[in-house]
Amino acid sequence: MLTLNAKNLIKQTYSEAESQGLILSDNIEAIKTGLNALLVNRKELEKYLLVNPYFEHSFEPVDVNDAPEIIHLMADSSKKANVGPMASVAGALADLMVKAMVDSGAKNALVENGGESSLFSDRPVDVALQIGETEISKKIGFRIEKFPAGVATSSGVYSHAFSFGDAEAVTIFAQNASLADAAATSTCNVVRGKNYEKAIREGIERALSIEGVQGVFISYGNLTGFGGQIPQILKID
């Protein structure tokens, strides 16, 4: 899971069905716009799933044609990461909330939705990792300075989302949260077995093979590894 911190921004938590998180902006009206985008896109998703239940239950990418924006975003991200579309749902909702906020004129639009973050800002944003009861939980984070950005974490141990892997945490950095979300799931799926170093190497290879992934950080078996371009690592007191 991720937590966000940026200076001098309005913060508001939210809860809407399965969607729970934090939204930040320099403009209260932008926050209202983002929350409205959450409602609109959740309804679009729910209506689509009623007619196309395979999209919800597939563990593989699904091709779509005439569909709402959120469905196309999820389908594209899952195809790149080679996972089922629902692996990107939290990140996709965050992306569309941020898009609506930016389109309304917000200079800062930050959304953490179910632990997946979509970020657009004119100032650095610190992202802290929460990884269950591990030694590094809430003790390290990352300073994001290039935007737009997407950050997502998947866990085979501390998440209620399904995973084939065993990593304590796989954190992906990408240009949007939908892709980061799908890629984190895809990467976490291959991080397993008692050879922790080998598993981490295989996870890094998987992550960096996914188009659009910029960097990856993996915690597994009290070991950590990273690859690609990751933001500045922070020590949190």
Image (cartoon, grey):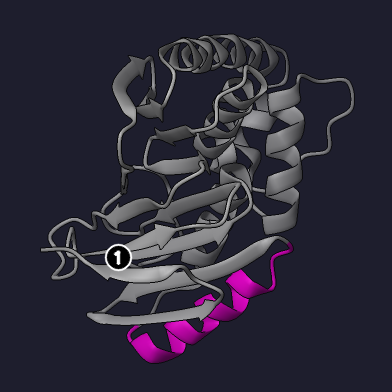
The percent position of residue 208, horizontal first and vertical second, equals 63, 73
Asked if residue 181 is positioned above or below residue 206 in the image, the reply reads: above
Report the residue marked by disc 1. 168
**How many numbered discs sit on the rendered protein?**
1
Residue 199 among magenta residues: yes
Asked if residue 72 is positioned above or below residue 118 in the image, the reply reads: above
Predominant secondary structure, magenta span: helix
Q: Mark 1 packing: few (<14 Cα in 10 Å), some, or many (20+)?
A: many
Query: Can residue 41 be seen in this snapshot?
Result: yes
- Relative placement, left or right, of 223 versus 108 is left
The percent position of residue 121, horizontal first and vertical second, equals 51, 41
- Relative placement, left or right, of 73 versus 172 is right
Query: Can residue 195 be seen in this snapshot?
Result: no
Q: What residue is at 72 percent from the left and 13 percent from the top? A: 51
Q: Between residues 1 and 53, which one lies in front from this camera angle?
A: 1
- Relative placement, left or right, of 127 versus 103 is left
Quarter of the image for residue 45 reads top right
The percent position of residue 53, horizontal first and vertical second, equals 66, 23
Amino acid, disc 1: Glu
Residue 135 among magenta residues: no
At mark 1, the secondary structure is loop
* Residue span colored magenta: 194-211
Q: What residue is at 67 percent from the left and 57 percent from the top? A: 81
- Relative placement, left or right, of 91 versus 22 is right
State the residue lying farthest toward the right.
65
Q: What residue is at 68 percent from the left and 37 percent from the top? A: 74
Q: Between residues 147 and 169, which one lies in front from this camera angle?
A: 147
The percent position of residue 178, horizontal first and vertical second, equals 60, 43
Image quarter hosting the C terminus: bottom left
Q: Between residues 157 and 213, which one lies in front from this camera angle?
A: 213
Asked if residue 165 is positioned above or below residue 114 in the image, the reply reads: below
Q: What residue is at 30 percent from the left and 65 percent from the top? A: 168
